[in-house]
Amino acid sequence: MSREEHKKYPDIVPCLVQPFEKACEVGGRRYAALVFARRGPHILFAAEAARRFGVGLLDASGSVRHSTQYPTLDSASRAFLAAPVGVDA
């Protein structure tokens, strides 16, 4: 992959973590979310039941808060990397 092609894709590699599962709630529905990247309080997750990806905040109690879902990993990754790291959960 050329350098220009590589820049087209969000680089989440430095943020990857050992995957772990957390409960997530959207619209009154709870489902399992597989967290696979973390940057400060921000997490990037896959919601298999919803067939979407999401970005949210992991608070001090380990709960997912303020999550937003995206149709693709690319769009979720861009939102994840754009989130300000100094924001507290």
Image (cartoon, rainbow, N blue to C red):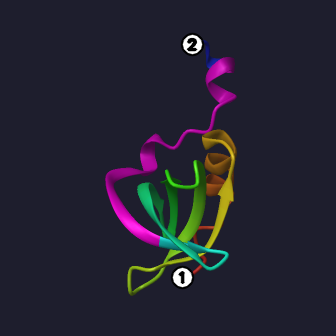
Q: Quadrant of the C terminus?
A: bottom right
Residue 74, given in percent of the width and then of the height, sits at: 65, 40
* 42 is higher (above) or lower (below) than 7: below
Give, as a single range, the part of the protein colored magenta.
Answer: 4-23
Q: Quadrant of the N terminus?
A: top right
16 sits left or right of 39 in the view: left
Mark 2 vs 1, N-terminal side: 2
Within-10-Å neighbours for mark 2: few <14, some 14–19, many 20+: few
Toward the left, the furthest residue is 18
3 sits left or right of 43 in the view: right
* 84 is higher (above) or lower (below) than 36: below
For numbered disc 2, what is the local secondary structure? Answer: loop
Q: Quadrant of residue 9?
A: top right
Q: Amino acid at mark 2?
A: Met
Residue 18, given in percent of the width and then of the height, sits at: 29, 52
Within-10-Å neighbours for mark 1: few <14, some 14–19, many 20+: some
Instruction: Give yes or no for residue 77 being in the magenta stretch.
Output: no
Residue depicted at 61% across the width and 12% down the height? 2
Instruction: Give yes or no for residue 11 being in the magenta stretch.
Output: yes
For numbered disc 1, what is the local secondary structure? Answer: loop
* 82 is higher (above) or lower (below) than 22: above
Residue 62, given in percent of the width and then of the height, sits at: 39, 80
Q: Quadrant of residue 69?
A: bottom right
Q: According to the image, label 1 marks what residue?
A: 89
Is there CB contact under 8 Å for labels 2 and 1? no
Residue 40, given in percent of the width and then of the height, sits at: 48, 68
Q: According to the image, label 2 marks what residue?
A: 1
Q: Nearer the viewer, residue 72 or 41?
A: 72
Residue depicted at 51% across the width and 55% down the height? 49
Q: Nearer the viewer, residue 42 or 49?
A: 49
The disc label shown at residue 5, or none: none
